[in-house]
Image (spheres, rainbow, N blue to C red):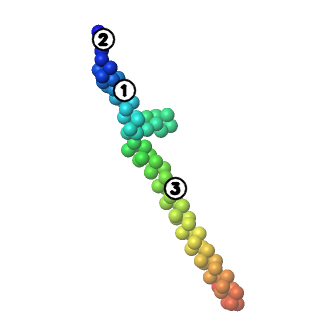
Amino acid sequence: MFETIESLKKNWQNDQQPFFCYRKRIVLSFLGILVAKSTYNLILWDVLSPGILLFYYFYIKIQNSNILTQEAKSTLAKGHRI
């Protein structure tokens, strides 16, 4: 009938097992839904990757058009027609 403190701790730890995984960050809450950490990372990179790729694409396009504009200005300054 009377349990020792150690046995009570063991029983409590066994009852808390699903929450223990949450404390280790194996499971994360994403938009109120519990998902595995690997799934969360996959969602994160699926969202960020196109944004990063588009940023670099437009960065390169702007750099190229800036170079072309500078060349056109220098040729016009020399008095040549394009």
> Residue at 46% across / 34% down in the picture?
33
Q: Is residue 67 above or below residue 21?
A: below
Which one is closest to the eye, mark 2 or mark 1? 2
Tell me the crowding category of disc 3: few under 14, some 14 to 19, or many 20 or more residues within 10 angstroms, Cα based: few
- 68, 41: nearer the viewer: 41
Mark 3, residue position: 51
Q: Earlier in the sequence, mark 2 or mark 1?
A: 2
Q: Could you say whether the residue bearing mark 2 is in a helix, strand or loop?
A: loop
Q: Earlier in the sequence, mark 3 or mark 1?
A: 1
x, y percentage for residue 10?
A: 30, 24
Q: Is residue 11 visible?
A: no
Most extreme residue toward the top, as rendered?
1
x, y percentage for residue 32?
A: 49, 34
Q: Earlier in the sequence, mark 2 or mark 3?
A: 2
Which one is closest to the eye, mark 2 or mark 3? 2
Task: Give the CA separation, mark 2 to mark 1.
Answer: 21 Å
Mark 1, residue position: 16
> Residue at 46% across / 36% down in the picture?
29
